[in-house]
Image: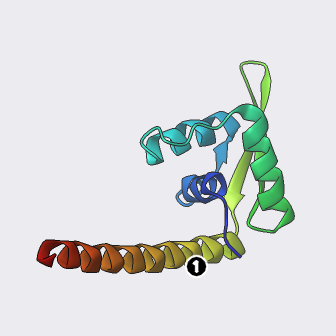
Amino acid sequence: MTVSEQAFFVLTALVDEPRHGYGIVREVTDLSDGRVRLRVGTLYGVLDRLVTDGLAEHDREEIANGRLRRYYRLTDTGRQRLADEVDRQAANARVARDRLRSWHRAEGTA
């Protein structure tokens, strides 16, 4: 089963430490060089699916500046799913790169 680009980057953002929603949004933006920008509603929809699928879980809650922050962390299953997705994407990229190289060589001889 593949994961969406948004879910891929949320999982990646959670690899090194638990993060709260705003921290995830910032980390995803940084990791994707600004290509993926999560809105709050989208983020929590992705997080809900990841939690339901057992790929992420609630870590803790804290009050900061009078607001509740809920932290999420990656589960072992989530770490494995992310590793599988990395391998899948790398294999797809190799296929496309090989095809493009073949096409480029064929175009050069025409």
Residue 105 position by quadrant: bottom left
At horizontal 72% and vertical 42% (from top left) the residue drawn is 43
Q: Is residue 108 above or below residue 29?
A: below
Q: Is residue 91 left or right of residue 76?
A: left
- Which residue sits furthest left? 109
Q: Residues within 10 Å of mark 1 (few under 14, many from 20)?
A: some
Q: Is residue 22 above or below residue 44?
A: above
At horizontal 49% and vertical 41% (from top left) the residue drawn is 35
At horizontal 49% and vertical 79% (from top left) the residue drawn is 87
Quadrant assignment for the C terminus = bottom left
At horizontal 69% and vertical 38% (from top left) the residue drawn is 21
**Location of mark 1 (residue):** 84
Query: What amino acid type should be assigned to the residue bearing mark 1?
Result: Asp
Residue 1 position by quadrant: bottom right
Place of residue 53 in the rendered image (x, y in percent of width and height, measured from the top left)? 82, 67
- Which residue sits furthest right? 52
Q: Nearer the viewer, residue 14 or 89?
A: 89
Q: Would residue 54 be seen by someone viewing this image from the given angle?
A: yes
